[in-house]
Amino acid sequence: MSESPATAPEFAIGDRLVGLGHAPLVIAEIGINHEGDPAKAHRMVDDAADAGVECVKIQTHVVEDEMIPNDVVPGNADEPIYQMMQRCALSPQDERELKQHAEDRGMIFLSTPFSRAAADRLAELDVAAYKIGSGECNNYPLVKHIAALGKPVILSTGMNDVASIRPAVDILLEAGVGFALLHCTSLYPTPPEMVRLGALAELGAAFPEAVLGLSDHTTSIYPCLGAVPLGARVLERHFTSDMGWPGPDIPVSSTPEEFGQLVVGSKLIHAALGGSKEILGDEQPTIDFAYASVVTTAPIAKGEPFTEANTWVKRPGTGEIKAADYTTVLGRRATRDLAADDQVRWNDLADD
């Protein structure tokens, strides 16, 4: 990233700051993996909390405001999307209880609204931010409706290029809300070679006002971890408590154990970023034993020269003259008698 954490964009979701200077926000996307069963959704909330996840997200579907009746079957499903959403949609009360449950467990609760009615429902719930899915990235009327609600927005950008993302970003900037752009590939699952983490740099260059992130649909946590050094500070994957459950998104979901690894790993990688190539004061204990110092390898009498035959470099590094200065010692004469394995000091060397 070209910007330092001090100057890079950031925004707050509740009390949680999101941006380059902060550890990535890991989002467990419950989505519709509950298959319309609130009990399964509540179990996933608990399992995500137990794994150390900060944020859980569902999808809010008000089907009649979202789509017209149709028989289109998604590529990762075996039933029409209209039928699937009717079956999986949660009620307003279900979502209210899930939000309360997540917050009782100390987590942020988010949802993706797919229609105006869904966004308005979430506004009534007073969610801390809105997630906009890739399919709605170029649905500018809906983006504008959501942005007008005045909360931060996390916008996925799968199936969109910079040109089609730009109008959505302009809407968010005009609304004055903080926002993140998540690079995404809308293939389920996404082959690793189609993840294209290089797109993060392209998004950062085109939209310097945005926090960056990755919404990942591969079958492992590795792309998310790899995105952290490239500037991703929001990491989203589908979440399930049981890989044996039915559902179109289960094959691209991660388990609680994997999410625990993602949380720990992303924090560790973030902590390891930055800095410069210099010798740290904290390395001194290692320097003391690991460096080599100039030492005698045979007795040297006062006035005798230091040569390759009687002088070499050996550990520890506690001597005055380090190995880097070995050649400056050679040819100089001893100012005192030295035994073998004596560390040579600068005042042991006579002036030329």
Image: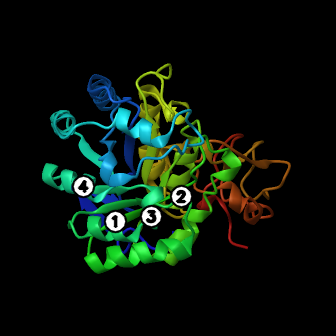
Q: Secondary structure at mark 1?
A: helix
Callout 1: 10 Å neighbours few (<14), some, many (20+)? Answer: some
Pointer 4 residue: 117
Between 341 and 93, the one lying in front of the other is: 93
Going from N to C along the chain, the mark reached first, 4 or 3, is: 4
Mark identifier at residue 142: 1
Decide: marks 4, 3 in contact (CB < 8 A)? no
Specify the quadrant of the image occupied by residue 77. Answer: top right
Instruction: Return the x and y of residue 68 as percentages of the image width and height.
Output: 40, 52
Callout 4: 10 Å neighbours few (<14), some, many (20+)? Answer: some
Decide: marks 3, 2 in contact (CB < 8 A)? yes
Q: Residue at x 13, y 52 (%)?
A: 124
- Which of pointers 1 and 2 indicates the residue nearer the eye? 1
Going from N to C along the chain, the mark reached first, 1 or 4, is: 4
Mark 3 to mark 1: distance in Å? 9 Å
Going from N to C along the chain, the mark reached first, 3 or 1, is: 3
Q: Secondary structure at mark 3?
A: loop
Pointer 3 residue: 137
Q: Residue at x 18, y 56 (%)?
A: 123
Decide: marks 2, 4 in contact (CB < 8 A)? no
330 lies left or right of 222: right
